[in-house]
Structures are given as structure tokens and as C-alpha cells.
Image (cartoon, coloured by chain):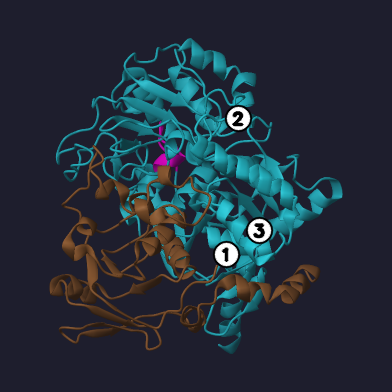
Chain colours: A cyan, B brown
Amino acid sequence: MQYQKLYKTMSKTIFDKIWDSHIVKQIPDGPSVLYIDRHYIHEVTSPQAFSGLEKRDVKVFRPSQTFATCDHNVPTINQHLPIKDESSRIPVEKLAENTKKHGITYFPLGHPSNGVVHIIGPELGITQVGMTIVCGDSHTSTHGAFGNIAFGIGTSEVEMVLATQSLLQTKPKKMLIQVNGRLNDSVCAKDIILHIISKLGTSSGTGFFIEFAGSAISSLSMEERMTICNMSIEMGARGGLIAPDEITFSYLKGRRYSPKGADWQKAVEKWKELKSDRDAEYDTKYQFKAEDVEPMITYGTNPGMGMAIDSIVPETNEYMGFTKGEKLTEKKIDYVFLGSCTNGRIEDFRAFANFVKGRKKADDVEVWLVPGSIMVENEIEKEGLGDVLRGAGFEIRQPGCSACLGMNDDKVPDKKYCISTSNRNFEGRQGPGARTLLAGPLVAAAAAIYGIVTDPRTIKQNIS
Amino acid sequence: MSFSKFTILESKPVLMPAENIDTDQIIPARFLKTTTRKGFGENLFHDWMYSKNGEKNPEFILNKENGKGKILVAGRNFGCGSSREHAAWAIYDHGFRAVVSSFFADIFRNNALNNGLLPVQVSPEFLQKIFETGESSLVVNLPEKTIKISSTGDCEYFEINTYKQDCLINGYDDIDFLLSNKDAIEKFEQNR
């Protein structure tokens, strides 16, 4: 009994293991000083942190552990020209100035490594395994896909990490979400996470850190896993992670910042150990069946207001202009946005391009195809997807956060409907009065071709 | 950034019973372009404050006579969404010093605490009582960790860890604390 009890307290989740190995100090009846391995910054949430440092006359403590990119404010056309809008240009210039002054690696506009912060980190192998990763951006949870504790922070916390490479954090509770089984055709990772949020609600994860597991999760590619972890914040969770495996290691191998040679072998050996013990305890557990997941769409103004695309709207939503009981399929769509840290990676473009191949864009739909990074943009051309997309009547824009939050010119006008592969459908998120319907890349592609909400299962699809 | 000390706050509440008020409602992304911490109060709840033609919306609580006070009381899951600290800055800049709800989003709660804005989490029943009591002033007592409805005397304890309580009462912030622990941080790095 005694032995069992002891054994029990020793069992840990992957979250416990990473958390415990990053504690510098524990304050009695207070938070822990948590060491941070990687810190990403962008132009919107960092300027006030740098001015804070200057006011205190403090230098950046570990500049080599912070990486910067500009993404939120940037235009998605003519990036070679100076940013026209002064209020967008100034924060970008500030970031260049601040990173230069403090010796921080910065990937400016036009740089081959520039792009959306949560796309480039993994792409470059800066995000690895078993790390603590933070950024002044709630979708930092994306990096949990590699088996990391990754979470969004505020600007005061950005300043703390710059000053001390540490944060004061209270350990969250632990939630396990298992998804087992096989996904149906035309169902993607975005549908899994929208399904989960629609069942559990947007505050179900508050106070928790999620571990996603189960056969349907472990069979996903890294990019799909990123889509899942990316939206854990939409349940209110600080983050979500997935235990690393061979898929993780093969994604990271050979990336620019990944360990090389003998260091790589050593790292992989260590990473392989990183999983939850079999009898580790969680505060809450949920189970989902992959077979229950259908192509999803949201009908309301938070990401929990989602449903299978062929369902009827369960409640009237005045802002969205939807009435209880109506169907969304065949509803006229004005805009389509493919992109963002949720669905702006190459696999998303492959899925979209494969669907539209040999078809023509609907005339009365404005479509923004925005790659998540220059690397994604280059890959699109390298694989010939650019020709497919242009052949179907689309243009490809330049990387940035774009219409996910409309900080640049890519705003959806008042009362217009937009099928968006991004992560939030809050009122006014994509522009004042804009009506956002969140969905995956296939539903976006179908809407771009037919100009209406279309269930991709009803369309004969190209063999990829 | 240091902020003013917080001990006991008595004020009329500003009641916003809506649930899930997200940070895009608190301050829309298009107003996040300023590189200082000042002035965000002007755009607090911008798209609710103003109608589409730019005129003040007389129906919105902050534009009404009973919309003046230092304590914002909102429905559950307040502050969900983005990590923008601008949301906390905007609320503070507008003049609020405490936000009361039955549930706060994690990042917003931290951001508020880091700026001297006290998030007071109360039970759903107590929140309901505040909404029902209407304009009666509230007393938030941080040293005692209590919140009281003046007119009815109803009182409830709220939770805050001792460390954060001390920080707010004394006006200290986390950076001061972390900077004073640099030796321990360096030692941690060497021992990894």
C-alpha cells in the first residue's frame, strides 16, 4: 500500500515532467518561477515591453533565446514597398529598432524566414521538444504539438521574459482529451478541434493545460497537430500538447535550428522518454470518437458555436443574421480566407488546391489565399500548386496574419459573410460588422468555387 | 511597470451582464497599433460605445449616467480570446480598478494583475445578487479578500494568492521580483 502510494505520486504526465524540470523556484502560497526556453516576439505586443526595459535600464538577459518576426500588421500585397499605413508601419519599425539594439534575431518583411510567428517557429526548428515556449500571442499554444509547454502571455510578461528569461506562473490543472478511431473522408484536423470545442464550450479549458492523445491524434501529421493545439486557447486553456513521436522527430530533423549530428541523436533519445506515465493522473478527462466528427462550420460569435456543416442553426444569432432552424448550406458567401496560424501551412494549401483543381472560382466571392510564411509561399510554387490555384482563378497573397484579425487592409466589410480558416469568429474580429464562419480548408475551397456554403462531402473530389 | 497600491475600493458598479466578453470586444485589434501603454481607454469597448456612423451609442452602459464607477461587473468568462494586455490597459485607463465576474479567462486575469487591476472572482449566485441589487455600491477589500454589497450587507470571500495580494497592496510587480532572483535563474541555467 505504502509502495503503491509512493509510486502513484511519482507518476507524471508529460506536462508535469516538462513543468517540473523548468522550475527555478517555488514561492510559498504563490506562483513558481518558471524558466523559459524559447520566446517569440512580434510587433504588436512587444514595443511596450522594450520601453519598460529601457525605463528600468535593464538589458535583454538571453537575447539568443528570443526570435522576432513581423506578422500582425503587415500588408499581404506589395511587401517590397514601404508599409503605407503609418500606424502599421511604426510598430514594425520599432521592432526592427528594438531587436537590433538588443541583439535579437529578427526576420523582417521579405526575409526568407519571415512569416506568422507560429508558422515560422516550427518551420525553422526553433520550436523543438520538451521546451517551455512563450509569446505575446494567445495562439502560442500551437507549439504544444511538438510536446512543449507553450502558452500566450501579456506584454508585462514579455518584458519579464526579456529581462529574466523567466515568468511567475501558477501550475494549471491537467486535462486529457482522447480522440480515438478513424476520421471520415473530407474531415480534417480543424473539424476535430471545432467539434471538441462545440461539445465542451469556450471556457471548459480555463485553468487547464490540455494533453491531446488517442489513435486519431497520433495518426495526424505535425501540421494537423498544430491546428489542434493552436485552438486549445479557444476552449480557454492556456495550451494543449501532444506527446512527441517519430512523426515529430522526422518533422524536426534537418530544420535550420534543429540539433545536428551527434547532438541530434542525443536529443531524440531524450525526447523519446517524454510521455505521460501510464497511471498518471489528470484533473479532467474527455473521450471523443473520430467517427463522430463531421465537416464543421460555426454559426455564431464564439468558436464554441460550431456544428456539422449540414445541420440546422440551433439558436438565432442576430449579429450573424441567422435564425434558429435554418440550414447554412447554400447560404451565399462573400469572402473566403485561407490562412492564419491555424490553417496557413502547406498541407492546407495542398488540400485547397486539390479541391479547386480543374474548377473555377465563383465570380462574386473575394478570396484571400494567404500563406503563413515565405517558406510556405515558396513551397506552393515549388509543388506547382501556384499554377493550379491561378488556373482556377485565384491569386496568392504574401504572408501575414491578414484577415484573421484584420489589423492590415484585409478587412471583411460590415455584414459580409466570410468563410475563414482562422480561429476566432468574435464580433468584429475580421472587421467592424464582419460575419465570420470558421471552417477548415476544404469547406473554404468549396465555398470559393460555389460561392455558397457547401458540404465538401457532396462534391466529387479530385484524387490527390 | 509599477502601479498604484490597492487596498480597499468602494464604488458604484458598472453592470455588463453579457457573458463571454472577449478581448476583441474590450478593444478591437485595429486599435492596438500604438506603441505606448497610454490612451487605450478611449477605445474601450469601441464597437459597443459607438454606432457605425461614429456617434455615441446611447444604449451602451458606459454612455449612460449609471455607467460611471470604478468597478466593472461582467458575466462569466470575461476576457476570453487574445492575449492582448491592451485590454487590461484600456479598462484601467478608462478608470476601472477592479473587474468582478464569476469566471475570468486565464491570460486576462494575469494581465489585469500585472497592471494593478484587480480581478474579483465571485460565485455565480453572488454575481446574480450584484446584478439584481443594481446600483448599490460595492466594497472590495483586498487585505481581507472580501467583496460586499453595501445596501444589503451581502459579503463573499474571493481568492487571490498571498504573493499577488502582497504585490497589489504594495504596488510591486513581478518584474521586480524576478530581477531580484537573477542569481537563482543563472544557477538554474548552469545546472541543466
Q: CA distance from mark 3 to mark 1?
A: 10 Å
Amino acid on which disc 2 is placed: Val
Is residue A202 among the parts visible in the rendering?
Answer: yes
Residue A461, quarter of picture: top left
* Quadrant in which the N terminus of chain A is drawn: bottom right
Q: Which residues are magenta?
A: A182-191
Q: Which residue is mark 3?
A: A131
Q: CA distance from mark 2 to mark 3?
A: 24 Å
Check the image and report above or below for B154 versus A259.
below
Image-based side of A403 in relation to A66, left or right: left
Check the image and report above or below for B21 versus A92.
below
Give me the disc on residue A15.
Answer: 1
Measured as percent of width and height from the top left, residue A184 is found at 40, 36
Q: A308 or B152, which is in the foreground?
A: B152
Is residue A215 among the parts visible in the rendering?
Answer: no
Which badge, 3 or 1, comes first in the chain's sequence? 1
Which badge, 2 or 3, comes first in the chain's sequence? 3
Amino acid on which disc 1 is placed: Phe
Residue at image coords 70%, 64%: A58
Measured as percent of width and height from the top left, residue A369 is found at 48, 26
Measured as percent of width and height from the top left, residue A269 is found at 76, 56
Give the secondary structure at mark 2: helix
Give the secondary structure at mark 3: loop
Q: In the image, which is nearer the foreground, mark 3 or mark 1?
A: 3
Q: Which residue is mark 2?
A: A376
Q: CA distance from mark 1 to mark 2?
A: 30 Å
Which badge, 1 or 2, comes first in the chain's sequence? 1
Amino acid on which disc 3 is placed: Met
User: Contact, CB < 8 Å: mark 1 with mark 2?
Assistant: no
Q: Chain of mark 3?
A: A
Tell me which secondary structure the magenta stretch mostly adopts.
Answer: loop
Give the secondary structure at mark 1: helix
